[in-house]
């Protein structure tokens, strides 16, 4: 089981529809939601212990002028000291996974050279990735949430599934790891059903299992074809 720590920064989180939606998603998987603006004070040793105990560390925040809110910057300056990250040579965060969940008020198409923002999200997130690199962490792709309030219900549900996978699925995001994640989630869902609904739930689970086997066979066939071409 992956232990995921979500370091959340938002100055008005109770008024953020996006963050409240994501919080509910995080509660469906094994995560620790840690909102730093809610802390009375920053206990450096306690915060560093949280980081040490996690397998996957996520920084989550809205994009303010191409960076995180001030709360995360202050937390970084106090918690992510040089000695803690790399200076003493122990590398306590080595091989832990580091990810970024970034919400934006602008569409993704604006975050490219020549577009309105004239910068990519990857470029804007470079300072955070640089810290993770110094700590010898495994860096995940950026998970972006653009213009949540414009999403219809179907897109929101897809976002919820993708977000839960980002928090708890084994990486890399391969077909096999996706299958394992969905299989685990479906088994847990069926186990919680009332007796009257479990028959239908098990039928769905059996269908998924059969389809998964078909996909695995297809994947093996594609690998064989690729190896033959090489």
Image (cartoon, rainbow, N blue to C red):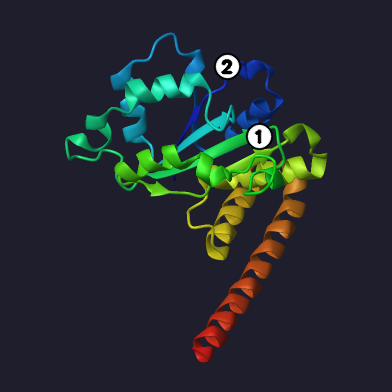
Disc 1 from disc 2: Cα separation: 15 Å
Q: Which residue is found at the position 59% from the left and 76% from the top?
A: 219
Which of the 4 image quarters holds residue 152?
top right
Q: Which residue is found at the position 17% from the left and 35% from the top?
A: 88
Q: Which residue is found at the position 56% from the left and 53% from the top?
A: 181
Q: Name the residue under label 1.
A: 104
SS for dot 1: strand
Q: Nearer the viewer, residue 64 or 18?
A: 64
> Does residue 189 lie above or below 5 as drawn?
below
Q: Earlier in the sequence, mark 1 or mark 2?
A: 2
Give the mark toward the camera: 1 or 2: 1
Q: Which of 148 and 63 is in front in this view?
A: 63
Q: Are marks 1 and 2 in contact (CB under 8 Å)?
A: no
Q: Where is residue 95 in the image (x, y as percent from the top left)?
A: 33, 48
Q: Where is residue 161 in the image (x, y as percent from the top left)?
A: 66, 45
Q: Position of residue 40 (x, y in %)?
A: 44, 8
Q: Position of residue 20 (x, y in %)?
A: 66, 25
* Residue projecting furthest to the bottom: 228
* Residue projecting furthest to the right: 152
Which of the 4 image quarters holds residue 133?
top left
> Does residue 171 lie above or below 149 as drawn?
below
Give the number of callouts. 2
Q: Can residue 3 be seen in this view?
A: no
């Amino acid at each position: 089981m992956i232990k995921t720590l979500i370091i959340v920064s938002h100055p008005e989180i109770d008024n953020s529809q996006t963050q409240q939606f994501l919080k509910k998603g995080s509660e469906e998987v094994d995560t620790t939601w840690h909102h730093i603006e809610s802390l009375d004070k920053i206990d450096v040793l306690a915060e560093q212990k949280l980081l040490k105990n996690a397998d996957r560390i996520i920084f989550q925040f809205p994009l303010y002028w191409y960076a995180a809110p001030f709360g995360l910057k202050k937390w970084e300056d106090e918690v992510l000291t040089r000695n803690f990250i790399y200076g003493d040579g122990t590398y306590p965060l080595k091989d832990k996974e580091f990810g970024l969940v970034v919400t934006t008020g602008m569409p993704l198409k604006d975050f490219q050279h020549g577009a309105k923002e004239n910068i990519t999200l990857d470029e804007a997130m470079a300072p955070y990735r640089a810290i993770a690199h110094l700590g010898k962490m495994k860096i995940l792709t950026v998970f972006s949430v653009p213009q949540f309030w414009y999403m219809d219900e179907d897109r929101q549900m897809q976002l919820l599934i993708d977000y839960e996978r980002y928090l708890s699925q084994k990486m890399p995001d391969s077909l096999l790891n996706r299958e394992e994640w969905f299989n685990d989630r479906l088994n847990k869902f069926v186990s919680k059903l009332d007796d009257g609904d479990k028959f239908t739930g098990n039928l769905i689970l059996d269908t998924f299992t059969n389809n998964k086997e078909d996909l695995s066979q297809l994947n093996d066939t594609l690998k064989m074809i690729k190896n033959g071409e090489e």
